Structure formats: C-alpha cells, structure tokens
Image: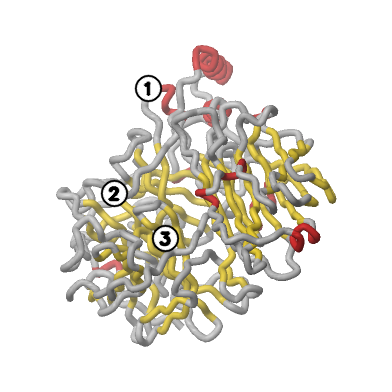
Amino acid sequence: MVSPSPFRASSFAEEPATTSHQCPYTPLPDEAGGAPVNPPSISRRPFRALVLVPCGLLLLAGLTLVALLAGPGSVLRGGSTALGSASEATSNRTSPVFVFLLENADFAFPNFHLRLWIGIVLVGESASSLKDPNGPLFYKGWYHLFYQYNPDGAVWGNIVWGHAISRDLIHWRHLPIAMVADHWYDINGVWTGSATVLPDGQVVMLYTGSTNESVQVQNLAYPANLSDPLLVDWVKYSGNPVLVPPSGIHFKDFRDPTTAWSTSEGKWRITIGSKFNKTGISLVYETKDFISYELLDGLLHAVPGTGMWECVDFYPVSKLEENGLDTSVDGPGVKHVVKASLDDTKIDYYAVGTYDGASGIWTPDDPKGIPRTILFDKKTGSNILQWPIEEVEKLRLNSDQFNQLEVRAGSVVSLDVSSGSQLDIMAEFEVDKEALQRINGTDVEYKCSANGGAAERGALGPFGLLVLADENLTEQTPVYFYIAKGANGNLKTFFCTDQSRSSEATDVDKSIYGSTVPVLKGERLHMRILVDHSIVESFAQGGRSCITSRVYPTKAIYGDARLFLFNNATETEITASLKIWQMSSAYIHS
C-alpha cells in the first residue's frame, strides 16, 4: 500500500491560477576505465517544426463560400465522438470545416497522431508548434496530456503548456493553455514536468522553469479545482521555486523532474537529470510534502561520457503480467526501467535493472547497454517491449493481404494498395536458410547510421519495406532488417529506418536510425509500421526495437504515396507475408 501523503491543498498559500481559459535505442556506452562518479556536494533541445504556408486564393475563396453558405451566426459542428461532452470547458476557436480545409491543404498533417490545429495562419497569425509531452495522468475518467507549446510561432521561445484530454488515447480534444510563463521563476519557459496523483486524490505537478536569469529551477503547481475532471485551471505555488541547482551543478544543467514514487517511510522520491563534467547523472531527492526536499547521497544512475541527461524517467514493469504498475510498486516480480534522453545526441536510451527501495540503489542488468520500453520481455528476459495500444486497431478500415511473396536478391516489388499515406502494416520475413549457412562471416562491423543505409548492399541485407514512396522511387523511406554474420558464424540482426531519400526537399532531416534487435532461435523476422502522412513508427520483433521518424515527402503524398517490398541483399532471397490496413483518422478537436 502507498502511504498517505501529508500534502494538502491548504499547505500552499492561495495564488490566482496562471491562466483562465486563455523509438531507436542503441547501446549506451559505459566507458571502461572512466573516473568514478561522485555526486555534487550536499534549453531544452532545439527542434524542427513544419510551418504551414498560406494556401492561395482558391482556398480563401472556398472558405468564403463556406462562410456564406453557413450564414451569419451559424455554428458549424462535427459529429459526435468518443470524447463525450467536454465542449463547455473549451473555446470554439476554429470551425470544423475551416480546420478540415486547412488539414487537407497540408499533406504532412498526421491524421491519427495528436497534433495542433494551425489554421490560424490564414487569419494573420503565425503557425504554432508542439513538442515534448509532459505530465500525463488519468483523472476522473479522462486521460490528460500536457505538452510544450509556443503559441506565437514555430520557433523556439515563449514555451507554455498546452493541454489535451481523451477518453481512449486515440481521439483528443485540446483545452485552454494550462500554464504560461508569467513569473520570474519560469519567465523564460515552462519546461518539462511530471504529475503525481497522491493516495488522497490530490494532484501534484512538478516542472522545470527557466528563470529571468536562465537558471533552471523546479516549481510546483496543482489544480485549482479537484472536482473538475478536465483540470482546466492550474495554480502555481506561491513559494516557488521549490528546488534550485545544488552545489557542483551548472545552473543550466538541472531539469525535468519525474513522477514521484513512495518509500516505506511514507516519503516520496523524484529524480532529476543533470551532468557532472561529461558524465550524465540522475539526482535523487526525497520529500514529505513536495515543498521541502533533501538531496540524497549517491545517484540513481550515471554513465561516463554521455553528457547532459534530460527527460529522465524511472518506473517499474512487471515480470509476470502485462499490466502497467503504479510508480511505487516494488518486489521480486518487478523490474525497474531508467530512461534518459541525451542532450548531446538527441537520442533516448532505456535500461532494465533492479531497484532496492531500502538503499535507494538501482542496478542495471546489463551495465554496458540500455535497451527499451513498457512491458517486460519474458522471452528474452532482458528487454522491454513497446507496442501501440490496442485502441489504435479501432481505426483500421479495409485490408489487403499478401502471402508468401518471393523477393529475389536486388529486386523491388510493388504492393497494390489503394493509398500508402495512412496505413497499419504487419509484415513477416523468412530468409533463405541455405544462404544463411553458405555465406562466410566477416569481422566488418555494421551500423545502421554509418553503412550507407538501404542502398548499401550486403550478403544478407538490407530487406524490408519502402513506405511513403513515389511511383518512380525518387522519394522513399526504407524500413528494413540487415543481418550481419560474424567471422565466428554468429548472426546479428539490425533494424533500421533510412530517411536519406525520404524527400526531395533540402531543408529536412535525412538521418538514418537503427540498432540491433534480439531475434531468438526459431523466430521469424517481424515488423509493424504505422504510416501517418509524415510520421512513420516502426516496431521490430514485437517491440524490442522501435523507431519513430518524421519525414516530409514532396511527391509521395496522398494518393501518390506507394508501398513497395524490397530486397537489396546480394546472396539471399526472402519470402514475405503482409497484412495492410488503411487507417481512419482520429478526432482531434480544438
């Protein structure tokens, strides 16, 4: 049982609400011979955003016609959704027809991922941007997701917290801004934070603020009205900040508090990302009331040479069941996951390990690597799995099935689907067993990002799918496997996404991502790909490896987006079986 918390709303001086209705993972190096890490004495990263360009006189004429047909005073409304009746707590900023026209003017707009309405650009305001998700929680029947948001434009700055709610994690409704940068302790940005729901129903939100002198501090906020299931209004604690950088930590290297977990003594702990010289670290604090904190001796985890850790997470996963766990759950059937985002490389890493609540020490199962995700992989015993929630399958429409397609070495096969821009793809591959035995191994190291991507041919790969490809393959995003055979005869499988030819545009990211993926004896190679216009989410071997990409094709859009099988290996044929669903759009309401 979680011990009752001494926290109460009455613990804080009242203050007006801040606003009122206004997945690749790779091995993380553990540098041998690195100096021992001693804890200190007791910007968020840049981003890219797509800017919506005005759509011309034709679109304006269409909007004018819609307005005339609707007549003065008319309200244009969409159909009912799974969201229920949340409209009383939101403002009607944009009519559904207006949004529909704008969405379809932008081919890159995803249709079943949460995103912002940016239709305001046509009435004289700049496009908005959405980034880091924050403070997810479930409260009185609603899922809440907050996110960093610049309402003034698709550029870095003026970071506030947007707020969206859902009944099912698929269909979303945007609410008014939850918190704005309006105090000295967060005037340069309301940055990443996390929510903790306490046993008595109180909700605590800790977040990083950038002060008027750009010092990173931790602040406390809480709902103005706990009886409101939508949690529209939020109050900032009058005594903020509750935490400042400790001695030995740079004032710009102290950010992103986690959800709290309880101890057997009835206290709460959080961890915060930082660095000490070039060593990435996670500091641990203990508190009774979320106002006063003690920095504990030691560190939750540290890895030399990894630089600043941000957006650190720490949570339990069950070894026995497939249900999520409260952050305070511990015991023999539980593993704990540490996740960190490396500011230097902009890549997320995860590690599975064992947490001793009494000592506060977390020990990684594999101190040299950081694997990934949400469910414990009982087959490997050393991985976590990430897989789309089952509600995504409710968006599936008609499907096409292809069985036992043989793809010769060096060939590409077109798959006859009606459109390739909005898909859920399940694919299974078999490699010629004779070729696996026949091919001689080498000592050459393979790395997705350093070996030429899908265009670089090897004996046993690459092979997979070309998504968001145009008919002539001038634009394509390959998602593929590559099998490397070592000189000792052992096989190592890589799972990669190649963005290098995803677009003919010159000002977009064209990186190649990927890592090794465990494949057990007797398993076939399997991938699942969710394609949503400009978002490609890929999962290998049931979620042991995951890659999320954002691409911006200029030709492979809407009905011109095609799907192909490819095998660029030199020495093996592959056999592929696929089931491909067209996907409906989720309801995302402003």
Residue 376 or 189: which is nearer the viewer? 376
Please say if 337 is above or below 537. Answer: below
In the structure shown, which secondary structural element does the residue marked by tag 3 occupy?
A: loop
Report, in whole angstroms, how far the alpha carbon at label 3 lies from the one at label 2: 35 Å
Q: Report the disc number at residue 227.
A: 3
Q: Spot the residue most to the right.
A: 404
* Label whose residue precedes the other's in the sequence (3 or 2): 2
Left or right placement of residue 267 versus residue 489 in this view: left
- Residue type, label 3: Ser
Question: Is residue 75 among the parts visible in the rendering?
Answer: no
* Label whose residue precedes the other's in the sequence (3 or 1): 1
**Residue 480, image x, y percentages:** 64, 49
Report, in whole angstroms, how far the alpha carbon at label 2 lies from the one at label 1: 29 Å
The residue at 46%/57% (across/down) is 229
| Residue occupied by mark 1 | 124
Question: Which is closer to the viewer, label 3 or label 1?
Answer: 1
Left or right placement of residue 346 versus residue 513 in this view: left
